[in-house]
Image (spheres, helix red, strand yellow):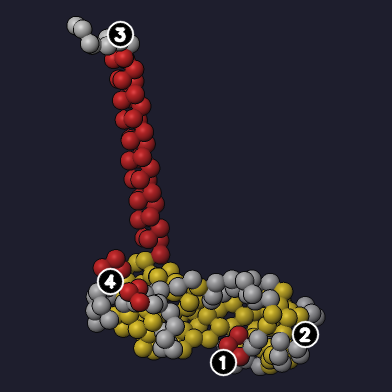
Amino acid sequence: MAGVNRCSHCGPLLWSATLAAMRRLAAVVAFTGIALALAGQEASQTAKKMPALALPVFDWNACPFEGCAYRRWTARMPVAVYDTWKNSRKMIAELSPGDRVVGITGVVITYKPGRIRMDRDLPQSGLKRGDTVLTYAYRGEGFAAAWYNGTYDSEFDISFAKWPDGSGCGGDQCAATYVDLGKTVWWAKVQLPSGRLGWVDMNASEFDGVDLLA
């Protein structure tokens, strides 16, 4: 027929292109499914159904803020060093400003959990207005160990909460208010220049070198 541009090989080319597109689509769908499965697996690894935690709560090996690192530290003030973190502790040494130690590990002890009050619904987190979120050791970057509605999550995003001093979230991102920060104590195990091991109360101490981002 006049005006028709016949092409004997166009049919196979179009079919080949269609198959290639279908393969790309299948790959995208498969990748998305894997990503969603991994996300679900990750969530299941940090959150689990359980009753509220009995106090005190011990979070071993915790370094409770972003950039926190156990390594060589330098005292910025006189620091008491104890033989243990327990109530029976006895002071074994006192660091002077400039003295160096090596931070080895630590424990964050929660004697009273913090309390976050939900001011509006937050469906993506399974929270409703009036719900209470109990917080324990802070992880950094807006995450903390938390318990809410029968679920404990070792790394729960609390960046939607406004802190008592007004810091934290801003604008439409705010969905809750920290009404009580609770009581936690961070103890760090350190090695003294003599090689002896001891414990320091990080709530009452100041060291250079603790924060990698400083």
Identify the residue at the far top of this view.
1
| Image side of residue 107 versus residue 4, left or right | right
Question: In front: mark 2 or mark 3?
Answer: 3
Q: Secondary structure at mark 4?
A: loop
**Which residue is identified by label 4?**
122
Sequence-wise first label, 3 or 1: 3
Sequence-wise first label, 2 or 3: 3
Check disc 2: other Cα within 10 Å, few if <14, some if 14-19, many if 20+.
some
Q: Secondary structure at mark 3?
A: loop
In depth, the one of 127 and 92 nearer the eye is: 127
Sequence-wise first label, 4 or 1: 1
Marks 3 & 4, CB-CB < 8 Å contact? no
**Do we see residue 104 in this rendering?**
no
Sequence-wise first label, 1 or 2: 1
| Amino acid type, callout 1 | Asn
Q: Secondary structure at mark 1?
A: loop
| Image side of residue 41 versus residue 140, left or right | left
| Amino acid type, callout 2 | Gly
**Which residue is identified by label 3?**
8
Residue 116, percent across and down? 35, 82
Question: In front: mark 3 or mark 4?
Answer: 3
Sequence-wise first label, 3 or 4: 3
Distance in Å between CA atoms under marks 4 and 1? 40 Å
**Which residue is identified by label 1?**
87
